[in-house]
Amino acid sequence: MKKIAVLTTGGDAPGMNPAIRSVVRYGIGRGLEVMGVFRGWWGLINEELKVLSHRSVSGIIGQGGTILKTARCVEFRSREGQDRAYETIKKNNIDGLVVIGGNGSFTAAHEFYKQYGIPCVGIAASIDNDVNGLDYTVGTDTAINTALDAIDKIRDTATSMERIFVVEVMGRGSGFIALTVALAGGCEDVIIPEIKVDMENVCHDIVHGNLIGKMSWIVVVAEGAGKADDVANKITEMTGLETRTVVLGHVQRGGRPTAVSRDLALNLGRAAVDCLLAGKKDIALGMASGKIAEVAFETAIMKKELKIEQFYKLVKNLT
Ligand code: F6P
């Protein structure tokens, strides 16, 4: 293996830049030429790529987003798009790919490997933390801390004005961000896709809280479980109490990666290069049980079951 290419695909995650830096610098150190592909799979289809040097990745370790840019590429789902991507790989003598992204990216990488046999190794980077077989992905810690910072601020006004807030967080089909910030932020309730929530119970708790003098309330809702406005309207309808909503949205995807996101990204970048050089392929890398772990793409893209009953109960117990 002489030449590899690195790309970021799907939704960006804070820590993608340190991952790129690690792949480039460690790869060069191991004697490889490293190319950067722009805008994910789109860049392979349209031959938008260039050789990266040590200097190309200077000063990016603390930057959110991705210097390579990223995209959700519809063309890559077609055989024609994949053929064009493969042509770019052959024309540029690329022997292996490092794909930095989430489970959508790994689904595409797995299909690509099956069709064309190009060794692909994934670095799990997604704020959603929904890659099956892995405990932690690059970007999750940063997104959680961003959401937590917002919730701490909302708490100030909620307490001062004795109001009920419904805060919607990202996570696609996963309640991981919601549950983690609800617990860490001392929120009174959380609504996630993994657990069926009875709105009557939520409202009963709010009314009971009011009766015993607890006037402010923060309910975190995962985007995969519903919309903040719908939950807030339901609460007002059932309790007669005023509510306010906050949708944190894409703010959770940005910002300087935390030390946890950076260190994970840097370690995974190194591991991805080592895996390719060792002839490994069709795998995603992330953190599991406190260690760098390899998981077959086929497994990584399956639905991740969150073991969260205890976690969920704790949010309720501590209210
Ligand atoms: O997968 C990351 C994520 O931020 C999800 O949490 C969210 O549902 C989705 O991407 C939003 O995607 P887009 O930026 O394409 O609207």
Image (tube, helix red, strand yellow):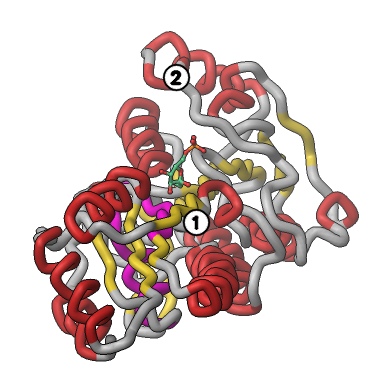
Quadrant for the C terminus in the image: bottom left
Residue 125 has which mark? 1
Give the labeled residue for mark 2.
Answer: 74
Q: Is residue 183 magenta?
A: yes
The spot of residue 280 in percent (x, y) is 41, 56
- With 199 as the anchor, is 225 left or right in this view? right
124 relative to 180, above or below = above
Please state the horizontal and vertical placement of residue 55, each as a whole percent of the image: 90, 55
Q: Secondary structure at mark 2?
A: loop
Q: Nearer the viewer, residue 301 or 86?
A: 301
Q: CA distance from mark 2 to mark 1?
A: 20 Å
Q: Amino acid at mark 2?
A: Val
- Residue at the image position 50 percent from the left and 56 percent from the top: 125
Write the residue at 61% across / 36% down: 70
| Callout 1 crowding tier (Cα within 10 Å): few <14, some 14–19, many ≥20 | many
Q: Is mark 2 within 8 Å of ligand 1?
A: no
Residue 144 visible to the viewer? yes
Q: Is 67 on the left or on the right of 73, as rendered?
A: right
- Which region shows up in magenta? 166-184
Question: Can residue 280 be seen at all in this image of the molecule?
Answer: no
Q: Amino acid at mark 1?
A: Ala
Q: Are marks 2 and 1 in contact (CB under 8 Å)?
A: no
Look at the numbered disc 1 and give the secondary structure of its residue. Answer: loop
